Image (cartoon, grey):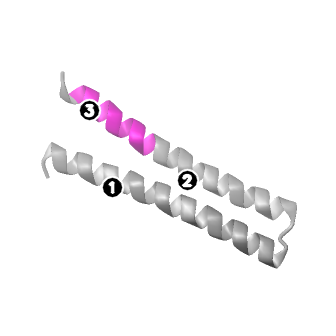
Amino acid sequence: MTRPDRAGQKGRRAALVIAGTGIGWVLFGMIADKEGFDVGTRIAGDLVALAGFLFAFWLIFQMWRDGRNDGQ
C-alpha cells in the first residue's frame, strides 16, 4: 500500500471511530433514559464514550505526525 492509501485508510478509521462512538453514546443515553439506569451506569457509559473519542484523537494525532514526517 502506498502512503496516500495508508493516510486515507487511517482517516476512514478515525471517522468510523468518531461516528460509531457518537452514535453509541446517543443510543446509550436514550436507552438509559428509557430503562432508568442509575447514575453510576450513566457515568460509566460517558467514560466509555470519552475513551472512544480520545482514541479517535490519538488516531488523528498519528496521521498528523505521519504527515509531518513525510516532508523530512
Foreground: disc 1 or disc 2: 1
Measured Cα–Cα span from mark 2 to mark 3: 23 Å
Residue 2 on the magenta span? no
* Farthest residue, direction top: 72
Whole-percent x, y for residue 25 in the image = 63, 62
Q: Residue at x 63, y 64 (%)?
A: 26
Q: Are marks 2 and 3 in contact (CB under 8 Å)?
A: no
Q: CA distance from mark 3 to mark 1?
A: 16 Å
Q: Which mark is residue 12?
A: 1
Q: Which residue is mark 2?
A: 52
Q: Which residues are magenta?
A: 58-69
Residue 59 lies in the magenta stretch? yes
Q: Secondary structure at mark 2?
A: helix
Q: Amino acid at mark 3?
A: Gly
Q: Mark 3: give few (<14), some (14-19) or many (20+) Cα within 10 Å.
A: some
**Left of 50 or right of it: where is 31?**
right
Q: Position of residue 51 (x, y in %)?
A: 60, 50
Instruction: Give the labeled residue for mark 3.
Output: 67
